[in-house]
Amino acid sequence: MTTDDAVAEPSDTTSDTDRPDPDLGRKPGPGGGPQLSNVWVYNGRAYDLTDWISKHPGGEFFIGRTKNRDITSIIGSYHRDPARIERMLERFALHRDAVIEDVHPKANAPDFLFKEGFDSWRDTPHYDFSRKDDLLHAVKSRLAQPEMVAKVKRMDRIFDAVALTLFIAYFAVQGLRLFDTSWMPLPAFVLLMVLLRSSLAGVGHYAIHRAQKGWNKIFVNAFDMNYVALSFVTADGHALLHHPHTQSDVDIKKNVFTFMMDLPRLWRIPIHTLHKLGHTVTGMIIRLLEICKLTRQVGIADMYGSWKGGLPHFIGAFGMRFLLLGEMIVFIVAGDFWAWLLQFVATMWVSTFLVVASHDFELETEEIESDTDDWAVNQVEQAYDLKVIGNRYVDCFLSAGLSSHRVHHVVPYQRSGFSNIASENVLREEAAKFGVEWLPPKSFFTDRFPKQVNTYLIAKSRPAQDNQWGFFREHFSPSALKTCGEYTIKGFTGIGTV
Ligand code: HEM
């Protein structure tokens, strides 16, 4: 990695939050919060993209959400031809270097998602995307060949047709169960719901990576169908923080799944299940209302260009929450609550493990070797391909897009898992020229799942590890019980969780 001194002084690019938080020289803004300006940072220079928010072909959301962030890696990775974007950016140049006040310390996201002491100005990794001889340029130039462009387009169309079939099957399976339980016996119902909900979350995952325009603003919410995430905030955390900055301290995805590690190990499954039930019943609706309030404070124009741009996001997000809650109510009224609950618990846990299966989230940032300054090489090395049943085309749905995960990370703008699979030979061949070892996909059942069980289920709680508490104190101390209570309440209020 290379450091742009203008941006990241005094850091090298390896995030190091163990360091005591030095005085980075931030001046307090009005009300004691950070002092910020209308600035986006690219390669250490300041730009004002305010007028571009509602014009961006990739949708208003991406530009609005990245104000006061360093967008260098985003520009480099999300566009087929970043050199063209760089030329366009000149229209918005402020003709000065970026300064610390241009960057929000916590990337304009909630503090609780980041490690203590994190500051975006210092801790955002910086890569050089201008080198024409790097892996990303090699891959993109092969993908730009007309036969590859046509193939990728065809694969996207097939993916969309399969996605539509899955949506129809999802409503049909629930309809059959509600119409007459003997038409959809309990084991078949639960299994099909786990498969369909996980797959539809996979569809939602790809929608998050597409331009946030038109109907796609609604489809992104399919990501919520497995009860794991709230697409409305994940679109940011996943597409804009996790992808460009994988496995660094900006990558909040790894922190999200370790919250449950504060719970004593025996209470972890029941309390986390209750927490997620709380999300479904009330928590995420309250969270969305909180986001509405914040959006009003920040100003809709700053987030989405206009109400017209923003409204479909909110309609889609509330619509999905009411769908998930409405299904539960319908099953209660039909006297079949236990079937609903069983599919809820099974889907939520299977999907949680699938979602964290494709990166070494068990490891601390410091343990992850990263000695390359080539962004795409780093992406290939930090992601696994995942095998669930062994058929890539099925697995890309089941694993929410992770069966061809390395391609997905190098070209995150690709629109579907099928186009990732079609592009895999190109990445493998080009990566070999850069001396990058191409490891076989990891099996979810025999490789990742046992490791995750160790890390997420049977490991001692974080406080017990830190304070060397025994089993009894871990589970029955007042502070452990308080943590359990607070975690449950957070689920139902949605505040302080994702
Ligand atoms: C700041 C964060 C940004 C993100 C996350 C982002 C993301 C995206 C995405 C996902 C697309 C759609 C790609 C597709 O449908 O295949 C797109 C398209 C586009 N964006 Fe951005 N963009 C950002 C900033 C910018 C900026 C600052 C400019 C120019 C000043 C720009 C110019 C374009 C153009 C021209 C397209 C259409 C052509 C293409 O895909 O390259 N974007 N962007």
Image (spheres, grey):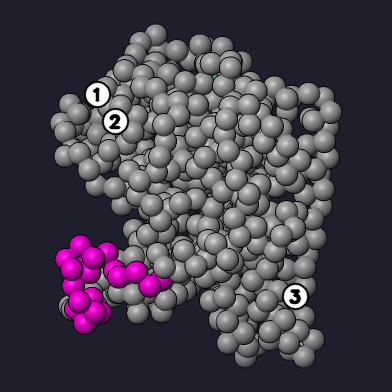
Label 3 amino acid?
Val
Report crowding for label 2: few under 14, some 14 to 19, many 20 or more residues within 10 A (C-alpha). Answer: many
Q: Is residue 279 visible?
A: no
Find residue 46 and report its horizontal and vertical position in percent.
Answer: 39, 17
Task: Check disc 1 and report the residue beneath it.
Answer: 10
In space, the residues marked 2 and 1 are separated at their CA atoms by 7 Å
Q: Is residue 344 left or right of residue 368?
A: right
Count numbered badges in the picture: 3
| Residue at image point 58% right, 38% down | 437
Residue 34 magenta-highlighted: no
SS assignment for the magenta stretch, majority:
helix
Task: Check disc 2 and report the residue beneath it.
Answer: 122
Along the viewing direction, whichever of 49 and 185 lies nearer the viewer: 185
Report crowding for label 3: few under 14, some 14 to 19, many 20 or more residues within 10 A (C-alpha). Answer: some
Find residue 340 and report its horizontal and vertical position in percent.
Answer: 60, 81
Along the viewing direction, whichever of 142 and 282 lies nearer the viewer: 142
In the displayed structure, 277 sits above or below 238; it is below
Q: Which segment did they paint magenta?
A: 457-475
Whichever of callouts 1 and 3 sits on the residue coming sooner in the sequence is: 1
Q: Quadrant of residue 462?
A: bottom left
Label 2 amino acid?
Arg
Residue 173 marker: 3
Q: Name the front one of labels 1 and 3.
A: 1
The secondary element bearing badge 1 is classed as loop
CB of mark 2 within 8 Å of CB of mark 1?
yes
Whichever of callouts 2 and 1 sits on the residue coming sooner in the sequence is: 1
Along the viewing direction, whichever of 23 and 265 lies nearer the viewer: 265
